[in-house]
Image: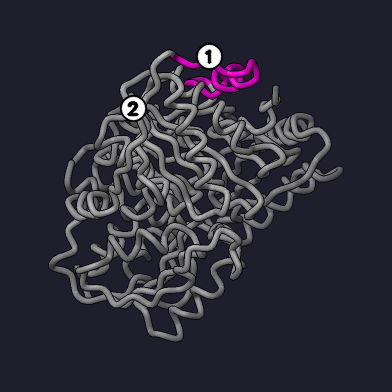
Amino acid sequence: MPDVSAIVKAYDVRGVVPDELDVDVARLFGAAFADLVGGPAVVIAWDMRPSSPDLAHAFAEGVTSQGVDAVLAGLGSTDLLYFASGSLDLPGAMFTASHNPARYNGIKLCRAGAAPVGQDTGLAQLRDSVNAGGPPPKATKGTITERNVLAEYAAYLHSLVDLSGIRRLKVAVDAGNGMGGYTVPAVFEGLPLDVTPLYFELDGTFPNHEANPIDPANLVDLQKAVLDTGADLGLAFDGDADRCFVVDERGAVVSPSAITALVAVRELRREPGATVIHNLICSRTVPEVVREHGGTPVRTRVGHSFIKAEMARTNAIFGGEHSGHFYFRDFWRADSGMLAALHVLAELGQQDAPLSALLKPFDRYAASGEINSTVADPLAAMARVEAAYLARDGVEIDHLDGLTVNAADWWFNLRPSNTEPLLRLNAEAVDEPTMVRVRDDVLALVRGNGRVS
């Protein structure tokens, strides 16, 4: 029997094809998932990677072996799968490895209503079940049917964000040869948008650049297209199109924290006093803006399963992560980069000012961006950093997710990777010199024999 422990991650299943994940393993996961969630059916979608259709169909065979029906939604983005799960009230499985290189594939899973499945809510059970050979087949098999939900998905997004009255906008969109090339044309059709498409051809080998917009190198082509075409903004989607990054009319990359603040303001107009979720590496701007507009900010750990759980607990209307994930109560608390993009387009299109001016109130601090350090012992390095700051006056420390150190004019968070011997640093301060000092002090402590200056 295969040991799948290495490919069952904190939030999903992800591994190299076929070395770690092949059709036989996918079939076992399908049977284990159907046994976990029960009937009547599981909805399944997949991305443009060459291995995805075969893996998805094998997963469907595993599902039907348990007497549970499989509904094949076909090609789709991850948020399209969440739409299918929510609107059909069925558990779902999405075959994608998001922004990972072409040799990878994976499975993102959810319960009915797009409820998350993480380590504590099913993934550990699935791992153990697959490692044990999966559940035995039932006497009566389920059926496999097909259902394309792309048009329904687009119509539902239009029902949540009205763009009918906006001025006409020029938009450059980089799909990175990922699923945005499939969903953007369907969602943008009929809207007052002139679109310059980049890399809309579905190609899971990613011939132009990685479909990972959090890496600045992968935004260079979009930035150039915005400037060359005089676009009002640019949008970049990752491989499975659940994340969206924005470039303003000057070609500058917009912080996802600024987008979180902008969408929060729009949602608070609709529901004054509502709760808005932000993860702990978002800019301080986000909770400040939420409070200024009468809302209640709630800080969470990084990761979709934590955010979705906190949204359910607090009935939050919206949530944002600094990684470009945006969550909406009206979208079954699931994340949708496309829905966030529509909010930005709607807000920009309602006024004559450029995007940079619209976002200026949300650009208040200097940020380091995420900086990774490879260390032999991440916990020892974190302890070294904490000891250096513990005795300082005016400093608060918490361990909600890794180590967060807060002062009046700056803060930083240091988190270990779930899968690699890495520490991830995010720092922010009232100005660039302060941020640089804090960033360099922490990196010196992490990487060597530094001291706090």
Residue tagged 2 = 41
Can residue 128 be found in the magenta stretch? yes
Residue at the left extreme of this rendering: 165
Can residue 130 be found in the magenta stretch? yes
- Amino acid at dot 1: Pro
Residue at the front extreme of this rendering: 139
Tell me if 261 is positioned left or right of 21 in this view. left
- The secondary element bearing badge 1 is classed as loop
Residue 296: in sight, yes or no? no
Tell me if 15 is positioned left or right of 69 in this view. right
With respect to residue 359, does 224 lie above or below?
Answer: below
Dots 2 and 1: beta carbons under 8 Å?
Answer: no
The N terminus, quarter of image = top right
Label 1: how many Cα within 10 Å (few below 14, some 14–19, many 20+): few
Q: Between 129 and 375, which is closer to the camera in this rendering? A: 129
With respect to residue 284, does 333 lie above or below?
Answer: above
- Name the spot of residue 11 as percent of width and height, x first: 53, 33
Residue depth check, mark 2 versus mark 1: number of the one nearer the observer: 1
Q: What are the residue bounds of the magenta stretch? A: 120-138
Q: Between 203 and 452, which is closer to the camera in this rendering? A: 203
Q: Between 87 and 439, which is closer to the camera in this rendering? A: 87
Looking at marks 2 and 1 on the same chain, the residue that comes earlier in the sequence is marked by 2
- Name the spot of residue 339 as percent of width and height, x first: 31, 53
Residue tagged 1 = 136
Q: Between 179 and 140, which is closer to the camera in this rendering? A: 140
Tell me if 391 is positioned left or right of 408 in this view. right
- Amino acid at dot 2: Ala
- Name the spot of residue 426 as percent of width and height, x first: 60, 47
Residue 36: in sight, yes or no? yes
